[in-house]
Amino acid sequence: MAEARQMRSEADIEAVIAASRERPVLVFKHSTRCPISAAAHREWRAFLASPEAARVEHYWVRVIEERPVSLGLARRLGVVHRSPQVLLVRDGRAVWHDSHRGITAQRLKAAVAR
């Protein structure tokens, strides 16, 4: 299973941007209070267990507990904040994103394959 680093501070936003210049980064934004996010989290975890997950670096952030980080990431990448949400970052910019029920292991596999 691929490992995912938890984002806890705004410095982690810059770490995502820097890492994306070396290889793609997938960020999962998770609400610990939302049943739709719980379902998306299960799909994300299934994706992490797939061979395709090795193609990218992985980060995640809890949108309630680390709200400044989540909102700062949205501002920095120019993507409207959603929860749950996934962002694929390459060369310092979001090249794909989806949210809510659009987050499935299959869609994540397809996104990183592009």
Image (cartoon, grey):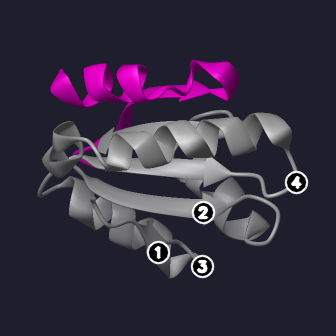
The percent position of residue 91, horizontal first and vertical second, equals 22, 46
Residue that badge 4 annotates: 33
Front position among marks 2 and 4: 4
Q: Residue at x 37, y 21 (%)?
A: 106
Residue that badge 2 annotates: 61
Q: Residue at x 40, y 20 (%)?
A: 107
How far is disc 4 from disc 1 in space, using C-alphas?
23 Å
Of callouts 3 and 4, the N-terminal one? 3
Tell me whether circle 3 and circle 1 mark residues in contact (CB < 8 Å). yes
How far is disc 3 from disc 2 in space, using C-alphas?
7 Å
Residue 13 belongs to the span the image colors magenta: no
When the figure is inspected, residue 47 is found, relative to residue 48, above or below; the finding is above
Mark 1 neighbour density, 10 Å: few (under 14) some (14–19) many (20 or more): some
Residue that badge 1 annotates: 12
The percent position of residue 45, horizontal first and vertical second, equals 46, 49
The percent position of residue 54, horizontal first and vertical second, equals 16, 50
Tell me whether circle 2 and circle 1 mark residues in contact (CB < 8 Å). yes
**What residue type is disc 2 on?**
Val
How far is disc 2 from disc 1 in space, using C-alphas?
10 Å
Q: Which residues are magenta?
A: 90-114
